[in-house]
Image (cartoon, rainbow, N blue to C red):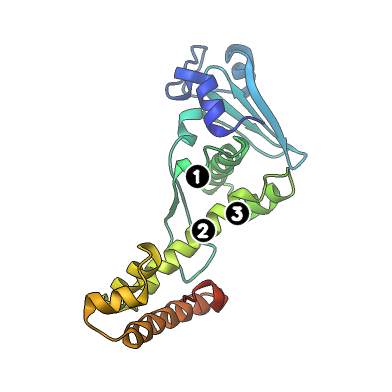
């Protein structure tokens, strides 16, 4: 299957600017898209009952037994904002579009399609409920060898949000030493010389900071193996 980036390159200009010139451009039905949208560049069946079709004009059709929606390919070429699967983490987290580039195109496109279906149902007088990002994730996990990738991306972003929050539990001095040790690769001995402190004092400061970070993750339901944050 093509990656999102490969499919975008194959569509060319149509990926950024819809080239559909058939009738009823603003209220487009799937029958018209199939007649006037040109050839199908790529398609996929998801979860055995949902069909995704990408047309050369730059439009995408999502069709399932219960719902269908049409949208422009350019809408998937943007960062994705989602509500955290952890209640304690703020909503509005962002997965950068670059994280999807090397994944099969169906991941980002399906998420966009399901979000549009949810929006259409929530704004309809006959509100039938909604589909969460969680349900999409587990559906994807059962379809294809690379299906776990999207979950990895989301978990990574959850971790980043928690790590950012845990930083607030550190003093400026702890943050500086931890960054210097782990990110810059400086030894405790080097830091001790720079700060005119004993090596033991530097190690104790770093340890206290790491304990605070572990506590923050534990409160959010994540256990960190101490060996992952240990240092020599």
| Residue 214: percent from left, percent from top | 48, 78
Residue 95 x %, y %: 46, 49
* Residue denoted by label 3: 151
**Res. 99 mark:** 1
- Please tell me which of labels 1 and 3 falls first in the chain: 1
**Chain-order first, disc 1 or disc 2:** 1
Q: Which is nearer the eye, 56 or 210?
A: 210
Query: Mark 1: which secondary structure?
Result: helix
Q: Is residue 1 visible?
A: yes
- Decide: few, some or many residues near mark 3? Use Cα within 10 Å; few <14, some 14-19, many ≥20: some
Q: Are marks 1 and 3 in contact (CB under 8 Å)?
A: no
Disc 2 crowd rating (10 Å Cα; few below 14, some 14-19, many 20+) is few
Q: Where's residue 176, x and y in %?
A: 29, 71
Nearest the eye: 19 or 116? 19
Residue wearing tag 2: 156
Give me the C-alpha separation between circle 1 and circle 3. Answer: 12 Å
At horizontal 31% and vertical 78% (from top left) the residue drawn is 174
In this picture, residue 37 sits left or right of residue 79? right
- C-alpha distance separating marks 1 and 2: 11 Å
Instruction: For mark 3, give the secondary structure.
Output: helix
x%, y% of residue 35? 63, 13
């Amino acid at each position: 299957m093509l990656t999102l980036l490969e499919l975008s390159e194959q569509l060319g200009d149509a990926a950024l600017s819809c080239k559909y010139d058939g009738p009823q451009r603003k209220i487009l039905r799937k029958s018209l898209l199939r007649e006037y949208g040109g050839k199908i560049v790529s398609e996929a069946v998801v979860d055995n009952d949902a069909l995704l079709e990408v047309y050369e004009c730059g439009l995408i059709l999502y069709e399932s037994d219960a719902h269908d929606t049409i949208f422009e390919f350019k809408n998937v070429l943007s960062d994705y904002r989602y509500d955290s699967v952890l209640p304690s983490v703020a909503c509005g987290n962002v997965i950068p579009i670059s994280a999807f580039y090397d994944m099969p195109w169906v991941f980002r496109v399906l998420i966009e399609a399901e979000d549009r279906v949810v929006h259409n149902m929530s704004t309809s007088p006959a509100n039938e409920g909604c589909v969460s990002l969680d349900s999409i994730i587990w559906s994807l996990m059962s379809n294809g060898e690379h299906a776990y990738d999207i979950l990895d991306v989301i978990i990574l972003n959850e971790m980043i949000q928690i790590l950012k929050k845990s930083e607030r539990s550190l003093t400026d001095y702890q943050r500086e030493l931890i960054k210097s040790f782990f990110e810059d690769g400086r030894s405790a001995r080097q830091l001790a010389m720079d700060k005119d402190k004993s090596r033991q004092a530097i190690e104790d400061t770093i340890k206290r900071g790491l304990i605070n970070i572990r506590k923050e993750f534990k409160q959010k339901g994540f256990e960190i193996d101490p060996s992952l944050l240990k240092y020599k």
